[in-house]
Image (cartoon, rainbow, N blue to C red):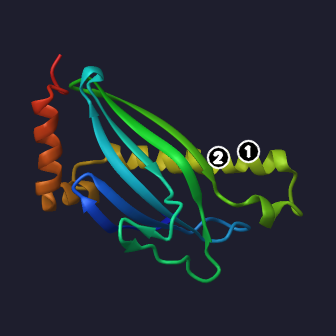
Amino acid sequence: MQELELAEVIFEPSMFRKLIKYKYNLPWPITSRELILECFGLPVVEAKSILIAFRTPQVENYLGFDIPPAGPEVVRIDIPFGCVNLMYVNEEETLLTIIVRSNLRVVRCMQSLLPLKLINYGTKQIVFTMMEKIQAFLQTYEGSEYEYRVKTKWSYYGEITRRMHEYHLGSS
């Protein structure tokens, strides 16, 4: 994704709980954005799904880890709550549901340039475009960076696979 400059795990208190830092280069007139998310995953056995919940930590120290301040001239995005649900449908399909409440912090810098309705529409389009790019990225798995990550971090992804089979998430 061209807009995504950085995505890195900055703290990992457990295998399935992570603090992730993202940096985005968004087009003019929006300046660069940064996002720090607390993420954790839960199996939902009866629904054959995995729920990944995330939010922006509202503290400067997260479980003993000092969250770095935003860089100069970088605006930090706030996500009070979000979740992704991956539900097994069949061997060829997975239902992906995303719910996010976010604040890209664009209103103040653009209020003098554009009407609020247009700002809100543009903000939704930015999020929609990012989701489309993630979808396209995931559909080109073979030979991708994601395939490489799965192979090099098999202790992590293998554990997810093992748990899915243990909970029979992949069987009808």
Q: Do the residues labelled 2 and 1 touch (CB within 8 Å)?
A: yes
Give amino acid for label 1.
Tyr
Across and down, in percent, residue 73 comes to 65, 80
Residue highlighted by disc 2: 125
Observer able to see residue 39 = yes
Q: What element carries label 2?
A: helix
Query: Is any atom of residue 1 visible in this view?
Result: no
Name the residue rendered at 77%, 51% in the picture: 119
User: Is 90 located above or below residue 2 in the figure?
Assistant: above
For the residue labelled by badge 1, is the local secondary structure a helix, a strand or a loop?
A: helix
What residue is shown with label 1?
121
Q: In which quarter of the image is the C terminus?
A: top left
On screen, residue 151 versus residue 135, left or right, reads left
Residue at 11% in and 32% down: 165
The residue closer to the viewer here, 41 or 123, is 41
Relative to 159, residue 152 above or below: below
Residue 99 in the image, given as x and y percentages of width and height? 51, 37
Mark 2 surroundings within 10 Å by alpha-carbon count, few (fewer than 14), some (14 through 19), many (20 or more)? few
Estimate how packed mark 1 is, as few (under 14), some (14 to 19) or many (20 or more) residues with alpha carbons within 10 Å: few
Seen in the picture, residue 123 relative to 169 is either above or below; the reply is below
Position of residue 26 in the picture relative to residue 65 (left or right): right
